[in-house]
Amino acid sequence: MSFASLGLSAPLLKAVAEQGYDTPSPIQSQAIPAVLEGRDVMAAAQTGTGKTAGFTLPILHRLSQGERPQGGSQIPVRALILTPTRELAAQVGESVATYGKHLPLKSAVVFGGVKINPQIATLRQGVDILVATPGRLLDLHQQKVVRFDKLEVLVLDEADRMLDMGFIHDIRKILAVLPKQRQNLLFSATFSNDIRNLAKGLVNDPVELSVTPRNAAAATVKQWVHPVDKSRKPALLSHLIQTHQWQQVLVFTRTKHGANRLTKYLEGQGIEAAAIHGNKSQNARTKALADFKSGNVRALIATDIAARGLDIDQLPQVVNFELPNVAEDYVHRIGRTGRAGASGQAVSLVSLDEKKELAGIERLISQRLNSEAVEGFEPTPGGGPKVDDNEGRQPRGGQRRGNGGGRGNNAGGRGNGGGRGSSSGQRSGASGNRGEGNRGDSGNRNGDAPARRRRRSQGGQRRSGGGTPNGNV
Ligand code: AMP
């Protein structure tokens, strides 16, 4: 099958060819015709399947074929793509710009954690396609900078993660201001009951697509476990990087502190490393990712949320320095490698106290992971010396549900706006010079919550998470 046979217009085929794509991925060959027909779609597809082009290409096609409605002085938003995290918003925005570059459509990306004014300026000019995280979008809507009365298509990308991050109220508020008559596309890695409930009120007679069996780990990723004492994990990681000469390795820790500590340790061992997590300004995160992609940084140490949606071409190696509390996160983590058909490796350093998590993961992926001790790092029967675990484990509620009950995260953003925004704001409006604390989406479970919500939630009524004030990601 070719992209041309899916019925996409010449400017889109040209853009796709420029990207070097020959054949549509399975999600693309299923989703593109359905979206072109104007159908609602509910798709189970995780990052790495090509889902972004799966919805972006047909949306661009439809918008470019239809008449741009008159919206007064401003081009009205015709397609809205909601994502849970800043990084994913930026990436999706980039895809929209890339695939749409031969079309006269305008797009922008808006998310929290960066100055709002440049976004306001871009939106005032009007855009056809807006990629946004929920909290910032609500802020902008309340300020009457953006209207949705001409909206034709809504995409919820990584809907499961949006619910995990506590965005359901924001999503419902956004849905309430959209026109009833519209096309709805819902993409989610997993389809829990919560997602199905959300879908019920959202999609209408949807085409249901699934390209990976639920919770399946990518078949192209070789996975194994190294059992090791907790205290020896940093040394083992350094040993693995050096002996296998891993040049680009994404390492997951459970906590921000853990990520910082490990980064320092590796640097002390002569391994260029950078951390990416919610206490880092958007600027620092963008820089760390760019350095990692360009090869200046060999090890990128990330927490789950910060890494969500990261798209790094040909990433060969993922390391779980600690197993995630939530088994599904393991699937997301290892999905960073082995993408778009490439092969990859995922190794987990597992200490005795992580037995339960390992069992949960193996149950979820219906697969036993090979366990191989590394010579010189064999675990001792009692699990070795005790390691201060405070930073290694956080209350479960704090991990998943956010810290609605706590104060906002105060360690964050002072960075230069993250997005890839061009100075003209034509393609992306996400830029700015001053972070706004941690109002951002991906860094913490406060997500992109508008200040008013944080204020309201000080009593902790909104979310019961009650995790640590600074969140844990
Ligand atoms: P996504 O799942 O949308 O995050 O896409 C994962 C990666 O696959 C991205 O780097 C895309 O550029 C790439 N990709 C998307 N579609 C194709 C395709 N048809 N052929 C090859 N690579 C693709």
Image (cartoon, rainbow, N blue to C red):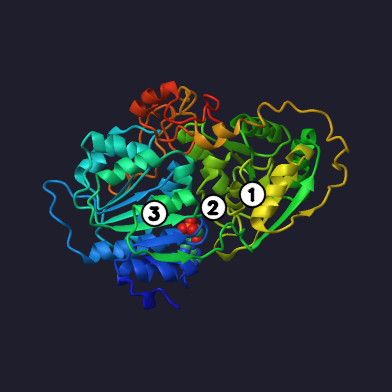
Question: How many marks can you see?
Answer: 3
Q: Which mark identifies residue 286?
A: none
In space, the residues marked 1 and 3 are separated at their CA atoms by 38 Å
Residue linked to disc 3: 199
Q: Which residue is mark 2?
A: 312
Q: Position of residue 19 (x, y in %)?
A: 44, 64
Report crowding for label 3: few under 14, some 14 to 19, many 20 or more residues within 10 A (C-alpha): some
Q: In the image, which disc is placed on residue 248?
A: 1
Using the image as rendered, state which of residue 259 and residue 19 is in the foreground: 259
Q: Secondary structure at mark 1?
A: loop
Q: Quadrant of the C terminus?
A: top right
Please state which of residues 100 and 41 is positioned toward the viewer in this rendering: 41
Q: Is residue 216 left or right of residue 225?
A: left
Task: Tell me if residue 77 comes above or below residue 31 in the rendering.
Answer: above
Above or below, 13 against 415 in this view is below
- Spot occupied by residue 226 in the image (x, y as percentages of width and height): 78, 47
* Label 2: element kind: loop
Q: Which residue is rendered at x = 40% and y = 67% of the image?
A: 31
| SS label for mark 3 | helix
Give the residue type at disc 3. Answer: Ala
Locate residue 144 relative to residue 158 in the image: left or right.
left
Instruction: Please say if the residues under marks 1 and 3 sit with CB atoms less than 8 Å apart.
Output: no
The kind of residue on which mark 1 rests is Gln
For label 3, being within 8 Å of ligand 1 is answered no
Report crowding for label 1: few under 14, some 14 to 19, many 20 or more residues within 10 A (C-alpha). Answer: many
Which comes before the other along the chain, label 3 or label 2? 3
What residue is shown at x 53% (from left), y 29% (from top)?
471
